[in-house]
Amino acid sequence: MSDTSAGDRAVSERVGSNLRPQADPLIPRDHAWHPPALAPAYKTSVLRSPQRPLVAHEATLSESTGPVFGPESLGPLDNDLLRNYALDGAPIGPRILVHGRLRDERGRGVPGALIEIWQANAGGRYRHRNDGYLAALDPNFGGCGRTLTDAEGRYVFRTVMPGPYPWPNNVNDWRPAHIHFSIFGSGFGQRLITQMYFEGDPHIPLCPILNAIPDAQAVEQLIAPLDMAATAPMDARAYRFDLVLRGRRSTYFETRPEGN
Amino acid sequence: MPQALDRLKETPSQTAGPYVHIGLVPSLAGVAGVYPADPGGAIVAPETPGERIRIEGRVFDGDGGLVRDALIESWQADANGIYNAPLDPRQGRCAPGFFGWGRCATDFASGAFAFETIKPGPVPGPRDSMMAPHICLWIVARGINLGLSTRLYFPEEEAANAVDPILRRIENPQRRRTLIAQALETEGDGRGYRFDIRLQGEGETVFFAT
């Protein structure tokens, strides 16, 4: 380590007099709440799970910051899967609204966050070059959507109820109906992908992917209830799916020019 | 009973699955026309100052097999170490046209991914430290239950890497090497690097928890 001071000098010369930035640090992630990397009943995880422990470090500016997506980057139909791929009519299947609020662990709404979703059609078939399931493609359904949360962290999508489908794991495994969610917070360290399931689906307790989550309460956090109050009468039922990203800790006792 | 802390729990992660492309890079799935372009294809603009670099790599599973259905996102600072993000108070001085975020799926046939970007500058780290130039990478795929976070560092930054506070968290120096990209011989403008990601087993890439 004899070149440590030389390294320090080389770095500081390039940076010059930049002010030292201060984003509130992210609260460490509770890994026990998430599915472990190795979940043998989900066979693909066996060869794709790191065996070494994750190296822990406090979140730095690189994790506390993240990209911002402006409204100009989205189109008007992006959150309406009933219309954003439709050629000559509506997609087949039960019409639903999926809505909810994105908050952080401290309960604060996360505004302006990009949420991207993807799903199978009502027959359980994905519009994907690698999906060869017997169920038919729907010419009016693409299966992707995106939106930005509003000032309070709320979002809504309109789509069709996806169907369950078989997948190669055990001989006869079926995924519960689900919608994939990809969520950005304000920091790259908050990045999250998950799946939303539907209240009452009998496939839920049978699913090796969902049941990789150790805590029953954590599983329930992924099951959206029917929300009759938000249902559009004579149009579409509603499911409510609230989301929580990692929060930030307030740095009460660190000297910060902008205060706390 | 003491008072309740009244904290929410983070939404648990689930795998991105084999059809992640539909939602995140739809043209690769064969879903055309919903978005004008797949997100994450432009980390920098033509006018962005900085040294042009190309990073290419592949993702391997525990058997040494190619992972052909992974998706990788990148996040980096500009050439002066400034993030284009409101939480970086220096954002106003960020390079023109610099976005800093990219997304790339591994190729269905070759398993390769590639990012075209600029080399980032060093970034202020915890407690008055400086972090060597690095690019944060986040990897999701079928079989990955929680997205994996790692960092790419540069082989020509030996002095800065030696004092990088995050690299120094890795006790075994051999394992630090899994985060140092390999310089490639390139023709024309810019430098090229190879950064292979090994999910498991010999040479397993260091992944971070924050």
Image (tube, coloured by chain):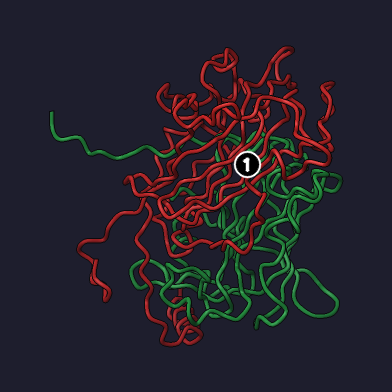
Chain colours: A red, B green
Instruction: Please report, as a chain letter, where disc 1 is located.
Output: A
Residue type beneath disc 1: Ile
Could you tell me which residue is drawn at 61 percent across and 36 percent down?
A180
10 Å crowding of disc 1: few (<14), some (14-19), many (20+): many
Residue B75 in percent (x, y) is at 58, 62
Residue A133 in percent (x, y) is at 82, 24
Residue B60 lies, with reference to residue A26, above or below; the image says above
Residue A156 lies, with reference to residue A123, above or below; the image says below
Q: Which residue occupies the foreground of this view, A194 or A234?
A: A234
Q: Answer with the quarter of the image where residue B3 lies.
A: top left
Q: Answer with the quarter of the image where residue B140 lies.
A: top right
Residue A81 lies, with reference to residue B174, above or below; the image says above
Could you tell me which residue is drawn at 59 percent across and 20 percent down?
A208
Residue A224 lies, with reference to residue B46, above or below; the image says above
Q: Which residue occupies the foreground of this view, A163 or A213?
A: A163
Q: Which residue occupies the foreground of this view, B45 or A70?
A: A70
Q: How many marks?
A: 1
> For the C terminus of chain A, which image quadrant?
bottom left
Could you tell me which residue is drawn at 47 percent across and 34 percent down?
A34
Residue B89 in percent (x, y) is at 41, 74
Q: Answer with the quarter of the image where residue A103 lies.
A: top left
Element under label 1?
Answer: strand
Residue beneath disc 1: A117
Residue A18 in percent (x, y) is at 42, 83
